[in-house]
Image: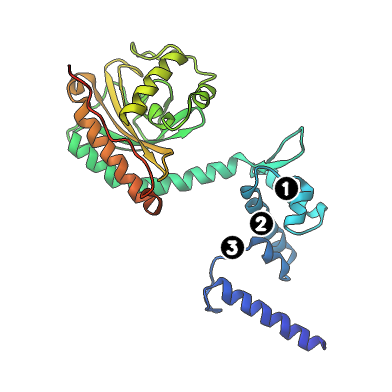
Amino acid sequence: MPPAARQGSRAGHRGMARTAMTGGDPARPGPRFGLSSLLTTAVPADQNTLRRGIAALWHLSLNESLSVTELANLLPCDKSQASRVLKVLGEYGMVTRDPETQRYSLGWLVYAFSLRVSGRQMVSIAGPVVRKLATRTGQTCWIAVLSGHEVLTLYTSRPRGGQVIVNERAGGVLPGGVVPIYCTASGRALMSGLDDEAVEALLADATYDSSGPNAPRSFEEVRARLADARRRGYCVTVDELQRGTTSVAAPVHDGVGSPVLAIGLSGRTASLRDRHDLVAREVVLAGKHITSLLFAERAAGGRGAAPRRRSTA
């Protein structure tokens, strides 16, 4: 085939590929999901390196770990090129290498980015629900996520004139606040989808030294209280994290039953003493509402436990 014809053929193929990736309109830019296929088009060297880096992160997200050779075959590129890409990504915390197996996996910075993006999305969608819950209950309400071995508060709403709990910062109700898992309602709501073995592993380093007089002092106590929370579909903690504070929390499921977020409220123990069941019902309903908003397509097949009133007999 003459050179001009070959060039025309390549241009035609690129045009068809562009049309396919942009939904039929070659003039409209769109997302490119076949990341490694981008490397087949001749581009400046610096752009090619960037594209390899993006493709490497994509392939690592689809695999628990990859060796340099495996990644080179997937990109595709020379092993030396794959090694250079991984070296740069590793310098910025985007990938990490196992010193024993020499295999690579996604690094802490990728997970930090993911948490920020998902956190913003959750707040933008769940925020109005939290504010409404605060208005209905008259208490400080919040949403929180699991962050390592602790619970991180993403968003807080207090109604006008609402009571301030004993120590909001120590109580972890302020945005960015971090509290232990074992002695908080949010922590137990987030652990409710784990089996006992996974919970025990998560609490392996717990010191059980909370200042709250009712806090559990052993894994066995946590397991018993967690079983009660699973049965009810929500969790109540009274004077566990700190004296004088009661919290109620329920899980927000991902649509198939796994808790990904906790929604709850915190208030003075004296003001909530006889209202646990009432506010718990509001919290659970708010959690189900957020589930339907965040995971609308999957929520129909999900499972969520309805609150059960405590026996007064």
Q: Label 3's element? A: loop
Q: Which residue is mark 3?
A: 33
Q: Is residue 78 above or below residue 236?
A: below
What residue is drawn where x is 40% and y is 51%?
298
- The span from disc 1 to disc 3 (Cα, nearest Å) is 21 Å
- Disc 2 crowd rating (10 Å Cα; few below 14, some 14-19, many 20+) is many
Query: Which structural element holds mark 1?
Result: helix
- In this view, the residue in front, 260 or 118, is 260
- Split into 4 quadrants, where in the image is the C terminus? top left
Residue 44 position within the rendered picture, expressed as x and y whole percent measured from the top left: 73, 67
Q: CA distance from mark 2 to mark 3?
A: 10 Å
Coloring applied to the structure: rainbow
Residue behind mark 2: 55
Badge 1 or badge 2: first in the primary sequence: 2
Give the vertical position of 189 relative to 38 (above or below): above
Disc number for residue 86: 1
48 lies left or right of 262: right
